[in-house]
Amino acid sequence: MEETLSDAAIGPVQAAQPASWWDSLASQAGGFLEMGGPVVVFLLFLSVLALAVLVLKLKDLLPLTEARNRTVAEATRVWMAGRPGEAATMLKTGKGPVAHVVRETMNGALEQRADALVREDAERLGQEVMTELRRYLRVLEAVAQVAPLIGLFGTILGMIEAFRVLQEAGAQVDPAALAGGIWVALLTTAVGLAIAIPAVFALHWCESRIARTQTAIETLTTRVLTHPPFARPAAGNGHDEQPAHYIRPVTETARAY
């Protein structure tokens, strides 16, 4: 009987613990927002925005693996070895922006389009790929730059309020109250830096991933363009000649984006 009563008494207490924990967490969060004021609320909004952008970019950039680039590089080596049909077949099911640009460049060359048209198509595709990969990065960059400034702005407002209270108190100054006001004022700067630092790391990671992809596109498409599958006679003579404009990387214009 005693054991039954003991279990019955412990059960409600254990069941009430999760609710009490959540209530305590909600109370702490509410107090945190109340101390920080509208500045902290806005900074938290920026953190949510930066996190959403990072999730979108991870979806775009994580599939850009070195294994995919190695497959495309192998196809270009086959192309340069004089087996263009086999190289194009290797990229039929290739995924990713590098495979897409190189495959379309190969198809244009195999269709014996004009050299200038093949090159222009390759440049256009390279620009489209770079624009797509850089999408929303400006938002992440803006959060990384603005968050510390907003936090500093909140700190300045808090310090102004603290010294106003100090002036009104006159000779009866409470050092503890003054220290508490300064602590609350510095809270916004801490929150701003806590948001900006991860955003900067995420931005640099995304940019490095995109830079490697751009380098791969430039290198591999240039291999294709400098080794056309069929010799094309130059106008006015019967000799085969490679067009000189093949030499420049096809995504050079995208580099300035």
Image (cartoon, rainbow, N blue to C red):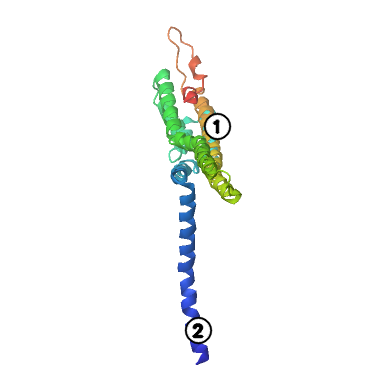
Q: Which residue is mark 1?
A: 77
Type of amino acid at the residue the image marks with label 1:
Arg
Residue 233 numbered tag: none
Quarter where residue 163 is shown: top right
Outermost residue to the top = 236
Residue lying at the far right in this picture: please name it: 175
Q: Residue at x 43, y 19 (%)?
A: 115
Which of the two discs, 2 and 1, sits closer to the camera? 2
Tally of numbered discs: 2
Three-letter amino acid code at disc 2? Asp
Q: Can the viewer see residue 225?
A: yes
Residue positioned most to the bottom:
1
Q: Is residue 224 left or right of residue 171?
A: left
Q: Quadrant of residue 219?
A: top right
| Relative to 36, residue 139 above or below | above
Res. 7 mark:
2
Q: Look at the numbered disc 1 and give the secondary structure of its residue.
A: helix
Residue 249 screen position, x and y as percent:
51, 23
Q: Is residue 85 visible?
A: no
Q: Position of residue 130 (x, y in %)?
A: 46, 31
Q: Residue at x 49, y 76 (%)?
A: 13
Q: Position of residue 159 (x, y in %)?
A: 54, 40
**Depth check, front residue: 23 or 134:** 23
Cα gap from disc 2 to disc 1, whole angstroms:
74 Å
Number of residues whose C-alpha sits closer than 10 Å to that of mark 1, classed few (under 14), some (14–19) or many (20 or more):
some
Label 2 CA crowd tier, 10 Å (few <14, some 14–19, many 20+): few
Q: Residue furthest front?
A: 171
Across and down, in percent, residue 156 comes to 52, 38
Judging from the image, what secondary structure is the residue with disc 2 in?
helix
